[in-house]
Image (cartoon, rainbow, N blue to C red):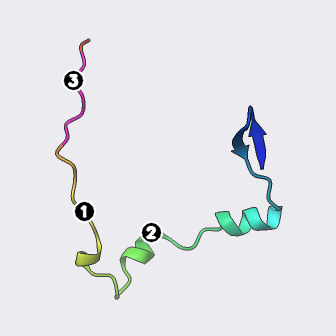
C-alpha cells in the first residue's frame, strides 16, 4: 500500500493480478438476455429528484 500524508493512495499488485481483476467477463447484452434473469430481478426505478436550483 502506498500512502500520501498517512492516507492510503494506491496499492501495488502484480501485473497478473491486475489483468485478472480488469478482465472483461462478457457483454452486458449477453447478461441481460440470460434466460434465468427476469424483469423482477432488475430495479429500473428512477429518482424523482430534479436536481438542485441554481442561479445563472
Would residue 16 be found to the left or right of residue 52 on screen?
right
Tag 3 or tag 2, which sits nearer the N-term? 2
Quarter location, residue 14: bottom right
Would residue 20 be found to the left or right of residue 55 on screen?
right
Residue 47 location (% of width, % of height): 21, 49
Q: Nearer the viewer, residue 13 or 2?
A: 2
Nearest-to-viewer mark from 1 and 3: 3
Tell me the crowding category of disc 3: few under 14, some 14 to 19, or many 20 or more residues within 10 angstroms, Cα based.
few
Dot 1: what SS? loop
- Verify CB contact (< 8 Å) between mark 1 and mark 2: no
Dot 2: what SS? helix
Quarter location, residue 28: bottom left
Q: Which label belongs to residue 44?
A: 1
Q: How many numbered circles does the render carry?
A: 3
Per the rendered image, the range of residues in magenta is 49-54
From the image, give the main secondary structure of the stretch colored magenta. Answer: loop
Nearest-to-viewer mark from 1 and 2: 1
Residue pointed to by mark 2: 28
Q: Nearer the viewer, residue 25 or 6?
A: 6
Amino acid at each position: 500500500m502506498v500512502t500520501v500524508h498517512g492516507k492510503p493512495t494506491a496499492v501495488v499488485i502484480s501485473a497478473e493480478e491486475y489483468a485478472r481483476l480488469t478482465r472483461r467477463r462478457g457483454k452486458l447484452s449477453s447478461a441481460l438476455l440470460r434466460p434465468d434473469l427476469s424483469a423482477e430481478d432488475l430495479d429500473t426505478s428512477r429518482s424523482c429528484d430534479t436536481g438542485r436550483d441554481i442561479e445563472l
